[in-house]
Every structure is written in structure tokens, then in C-alpha cells.
Amino acid sequence: MMPKSYNEINQKIKNGDVVVVTAEEMIKIVQSKGINVAAEEIDVVTTGTFGPMCSSGAFLNFGHSDPPIKLEHLWLNEVHAYHGNAAVDCYIGVTRAADIKPFDYGGGNVIEDLVSGKRIRLRGTSYTTDCYPLEEIDTYFTIDDLNQAILCNPRNAYQKYVCAVNSTDKTLYTYMGKLLPNLGNAHYAGAGCLNPLCNDPDYETIGIGTRIFLGGGIGYVMGEGTQHNPKDGFGTLFLKGDLKQMKPEYLRGVNFEKYGPSMSVGVGIPIPILNEKLACKTAIKDEDIETDVLDYGVPRR
């Protein structure tokens, strides 16, 4: 086949005659028609993943109070947020646990509540300066009151993750869930053949500036994520998006028993089928994906 261009596919989208299939559907098409025909007929393959992504959070700008305060310590629904930026900017991380009942509520729950339109309590303290004379603030706000609310996730959409087991004689409580003793169960987190990075492992179409579905709204790839390791099949992405566009169905605060909070994030990435190689890669099956089994009973990495 002649390679397709982005312009050609975009024009098909405008004309309304673009052919889009899911990653699962692409497997069947390649099996029945072959790679060459699939590459000719299919323009875009949609991929996606949804699961706990601990390296996530949001930058919030509250606007100034009257009189103004330079926030030094602040809590959102009793979850400590990070302040080290300008006076009324903060970052709320999804794994930050509430001061009260830390296993039941955390930063991921705050973000879900915020996107759901609920009122969030802001409590802050500070030292005073000539331009910021207020020492304390205790108020409520909703997402509509914020100047900006930016989801900013340093590590999302893991290409795959390890399979967790426990060889000890006691139950372990981890971010991979409850691991039973004596290899009583195995936990694996991943979207398999639907995962975006499994469908484009060489990053032919996914890169800086790629527009994506993020948390029910529009997001962008900012670059590689932390702990990015594509050589071993453990690639990650750094993602951002406008939290005000997002939906709670795709941003869910989660709390792991005896471990703590996180947030499940929905990520979707369309992959344009520019050539036969991409048609082949987007036909990856679950049974083609291998990972490492890691014993969480050994307290080292």
C-alpha cells in the first residue's frame, strides 16, 4: 500500500468517510483480511486504558482573597495539598491521604469530588508579609470558582505492569491490592490489547503534543512519563488536560485496603494507520503481551 498521511486521514474525518475501529476489532480484521487490506481499509484504531494511576494530580489556582494570603500550608477536605508556587497556586496529588481516616479518603477523592461539582473545603495558614497580610483562611469553593484547574499527571498509561504475588505466610496489602499468602493469588493491572502504548510501542504516532481523551475531556501528551522504560516494554506518558472539561466517570478516587488512596484515570488515544507496520502493531493480542512476575513478599526491588 501507499503510506497514508495525517492530512489524508484528517480530510476523511472532515468528509465523514473515515473508517475507525477499536483495537479489539482490528485484531479480527487483520486475521480475516490480512495486514495489507487492513492497512488500506482502516484509517484509525482507537485504544484506551482505565485504572489506578498513582502519579497523577492537579494544579489549582484559587484567585485572591480580600485581604490576600500567601498560602503556606493548605488542606482540601483535610487532604494536605502542596504549596511551593505562587501565592494561591497548589498541587493536589492523588495519593496524598487525608489527615483523618487516611485509608478512606485522599487526593484522588478530592479530584473526583471537584469534577463532580461538589463543594470543597479550603483551609489555609500562612506567615504574613506586607503584601499578603492574612494569616488564615477557611472557606468553600467549587470547580467553577477556580481560575484554572489543570490535571497534570507525570506518569500515566503504563504500557504494561508487573504481576504481583506474595510468597510469605502473611497477607500483604499493596497498591496492587490484597495479596494472599503462599502464592494464594496473583494481581495484574493492564488493558492488554487495548493499551495505547502496546499498539504503538515505537511511538510512531504518540509523542509530544498528541491530542488525546483524558478523564472524559481533551488532554495532551507532554512527553515521556517518569520511569519511562520502552526498551523493556514499560513505557509511560506525561499527560495534562483541563480538569473543568472532565467527568467523574473517568476520574475515580480509589482507596486500597490498608494501603491508601489513588485515582483511576481514563485515557484514550487514537492511532492513525499510516502504514502496514502500524496495521500490524495495532493487531496485537492479549496473548502476545508478556510481563514479569514480582514477589512482593521480598521487600526489595
Image (cartoon, grey):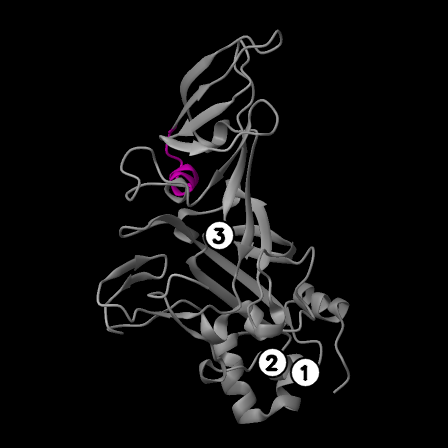
Which of the two discs, 2 and 3, sits closer to the camera? 2
Residue range corresponding to the magenta coloring? 110-120
Three-letter code, disc 3: Gly
Q: How far across and down, in percent of the image, does residue 229 sit?
A: 60, 66
Can residue 246 be seen here? The reply is yes
Please tell me the numbered disc located at residue 54: none
Query: Residue 35 falls in which quadrant of the image?
Result: bottom right
Residue 152 versus residue 264 in the image, above or below: above
**Which residue is found at the position 51% from the left and 84% from the top?**
27
Which residue is identified by label 1?
277
Q: Is residue 21 above or below residue 88?
A: below
Q: Which residue is mark 2?
A: 281
- Residue drawn at x 74%, y 87% as measured from the top left: 1
The magenta stretch spans residue 242:
no
Closer to the chain start, of discs 2 and 3, is 3
In magenta segment, residue 114: yes
Q: Nearer the viewer, residue 247 or 188?
A: 188
Q: Residue at x 47, y 24 (%)?
A: 73
* Cα gap from disc 2 to disc 3, whole angstroms: 26 Å
